[in-house]
Image (cartoon, rainbow, N blue to C red):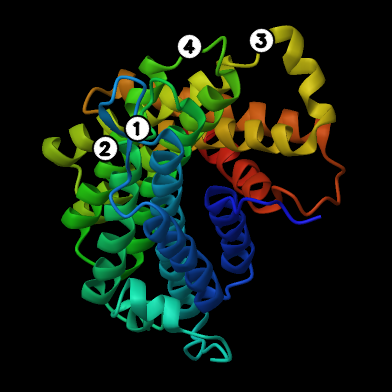
Amino acid sequence: QMPSVFDSVSWSQEALGLSKYYINVKKFRYAAHCICSAKRKISSENPSGISSNSEGKETEDEQTRTINADIDVAFGDLYLAILQTEVERCRENRAPYTENQDIDDSSLLDSDKDLDAKINTTITNFEEGRNVFKLANRHYENSKLFYVLDGHVSKHIVILRNQAELYKSLLYFENDSKRRISMWNRAKLLLSPLLDQLNPQIYAVEHKEIAFELGKIVQEVVNENKRRSNGSTSKKFSKRINECSLEAIKHFSYFLACFDQKMFEDIFEHQEVAIACLYAQFYIANLYGNMVHSNPENQVEYWRKSKSGYEKVVSLRRRILEPDSKSFRQEFEICNEFIPLLTQK
């Protein structure tokens, strides 16, 4: 039986839910159609977004604020997916993707006359990528006005991580190493405050995920500085590489420390978690191997920690993976290659 009163908020939420499906299957025009239809429905029901409370004061309806924030998130997710898809296409050197235009675009044009061009964007350079980045980031920033950390923790974290993903995707189109480092650092600044703001006992999973992600981000800064140094062992580059390496090691070590010693024996029943721990330990060993010090004793200590880390990785892999497993195979070979080299040093 059809409800006697049409619920525009529920209808809009269903439309946004459908847009997620279309984004996942890369049907961006259909996704945009759903998002814009939700936006138009909410706007037509309450153009100002204002209602009166029991005291006669005008306030924005909580449901309206929620759905408008969700619409911003949906637009952000759409543009992020477009940017990621274009990066994937460029990496694989594929032809631009086109969609069948077999739907009514009136809602698209009513909501945003330029949206059609934005959806069908073919990104080939940094400027084009930045245009899509800005669209997504603007919507995510708008959504955070409602989805603040205090009260909407999970949603706020997802938005911040998606904003970090925007930087990672845009980096593909940037060749200047100095600007790349700046973009990696902006991604880091989005996430790093969360480790201080979130209670690790309540948000244990989020702490693990964010620590690992931050470790990967800072590791990329290390790699960028290594490329900039072009093999130079000058104090300037050595200091940058060492400081960033220690920061990345701190994040990966914290990730591993989130598993107490009792749990550490049991997590290997869960292959995905076990492999993440393997990678964290491998990255730590690799980072120590990248560090440079003018004092021979300190340099030897870096090499010793690197060798010890690689040996630990080899031991852990043998415990949790079959010998012929394809998982972590390349990293395992690197460990076996570097252990004897570091022993000689």
Write the residue at 35% across / 76% down: 110
The answer to whether 223 appears left or right of 322 in the picture is: left
Query: Sequence order check: which comes first, mark 4 or mark 1?
Result: 4
Looking at the image, do the residues carrying marks 3 and 2 touch, with CB atoms under 8 Å apart? no
The crowd level at tag 3 (other Cα within 10 Å; few <14, some 14-19, many 20+) is few
Query: Sequence order check: which comes first, mark 1 or mark 3?
Result: 1
Type of residue at label 2? Ile
- Residue under circle 2? 241
Expressed as whole percent of the image width and height from the top left, the position of residue 147 reads 39, 34
The crowd level at tag 2 (other Cα within 10 Å; few <14, some 14-19, many 20+) is many
Instruction: Work out whether residue 99 or residue 209 is closer to the camera in this orientation and state it.
Output: 99
Q: Nearer the viewer, mark 4 or mark 3?
A: 4
Write the residue at 60% across / 46% down: 337
Q: Nearer the viewer, mark 2 or mark 4?
A: 4
Type of residue at label 1? Ser
Real-space Cα distance between discs 2 and 4?
Answer: 31 Å
Q: Quadrant of residue 118?
A: bottom left
The answer to whether 325 appears left or right of 211 in the picture is: right
Q: Quadrant of residue 125?
A: bottom left
**Residue 199: mark in rendering:** 4
Q: Nearer the viewer, mark 1 or mark 3?
A: 3
Q: Quadrant of residue 318?
A: top right
- Residue under circle 3? 260
The quarter of the rendered structure image containing the C terminus is top left
Real-space Cα distance between discs 2 and 1?
Answer: 6 Å
- Residue under circle 1? 245
Measured along the vertical axis of the image, is residue 289 above or below residue 114? above
